[in-house]
Amino acid sequence: MVRAEPGPLNAQTGAAEAAAAAAGAPVKRAYVQRMFSDIAPRYDLLNRLLSLGIDRSWRRAAVHALGWTRKPAGRYLDLCAGTLDVSAQLASESGFGGRVVAADFAEPMLRSGRGKGPAGRIEPVVADALALPLAGASCDGAIVAFGIRNVAGLDAGLEEVARVLAPGARFVILEFSTPSVPLVRAGYLFYFRYILPLIGGAISGHPTAYKYLPESVAHFPEREALAERMRRAGFTTVTWRALTFGIAALHVGEKA
Ligand SMILES: C[S@@+](CC[C@H](N)C(=O)[O-])C[C@H]1O[C@@H](n2cnc3c(N)ncnc32)[C@H](O)[C@@H]1O
């Protein structure tokens, strides 16, 4: 096999591909699947480091918002499950007696998460968010944490979640957002656009993954716009709240 040598031209091509993926070009699906497969071994370490550990409390808030206590023995979907942090958080909750289907199309991410959470409650499935191998109305709730932004086709992704949820089941989206307060926003954007790509690139060894991250957030709908897209996809009583100065946001809706 002939391998392309790393060099200025390849670096430019890589950056252009990441920018196109972040903007939603047709290359997005392939880029995202390859990129997460590449960074899987370092993904958890980088998450903890780059968020100073705050990401754990965001995932806890998302699991709480799911309202799984309404049906503790139910079947829940962790969409774009990655290294299974959300699945493990949900499956480890005291009183939880159900199952978590952890779907992701990057198998190395799922493999990196093996062993997390109590045995027998998490079912990892290699699957595309746009074509889930689940029957209609077969899930009692769903969460997607930092995943829906990466799906090539936001509306189709939301509609696919609506398809697999039972009427009245909750859907929780945890996603990056941008702080609104001007001073916080400026400081945060400096970190997110310039410091994070340097640290992320150095530790992951991936040339573009942590450039793609801020660019994809910039292209993602703002909080109220995302709520509206959820309503259009078939969710009612959609609400959202900002987390940690608006660095992240939690959206919650119910399948109509
Ligand atoms: C930033 S990671 C989030 C992982 C995990 N939810 C978390 O909280 O850390 C995004 C994940 O979404 C997955 N993903 C993106 N598009 C997808 C798609 N169309 N179908 C399935 N998984 C997808 C990626 O493979 C990746 O593992």
Image: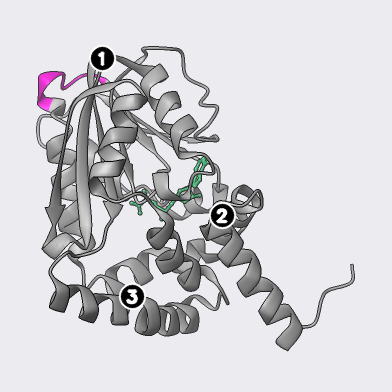
Q: Are marks 3 and 1 in contact (CB under 8 Å)?
A: no
Q: In the rendered view, does 9 fall on the left or right side of 34?
A: right
What kind of element bears circle 3? helix
Q: By what rule are the colours in the image chosen?
A: one colour
Q: Who's the residue at 25% across and 70% down the image?
A: 51
The region drawn magenta spans 69-74
Q: In the rendered view, does 91 fall on the left or right side of 213?
A: left
Residue 179 occupies quadrant = bottom left
Which residue was labeled with disc 3? Answer: 192
- Residue 9 at what x, y percent from top left? 75, 83
- Disc 3 residue type (three-letter): Phe
Which residue was labeled with disc 2? Answer: 32
In front: 236, or 3?
236
- Residue 238 at what x, y percent from top left? 19, 30
Q: Is mark 1 within 8 Å of ligand 1?
A: no
Q: In the rendered view, does 48 fall on the left or right side of 22?
A: left
Circle nearer the N terminus (3, 2) = 2
What kind of element bears circle 1? loop
Which residue was labeled with disc 1? Answer: 256
Q: Who's the residue at 27% across and 58% down the image?
A: 177
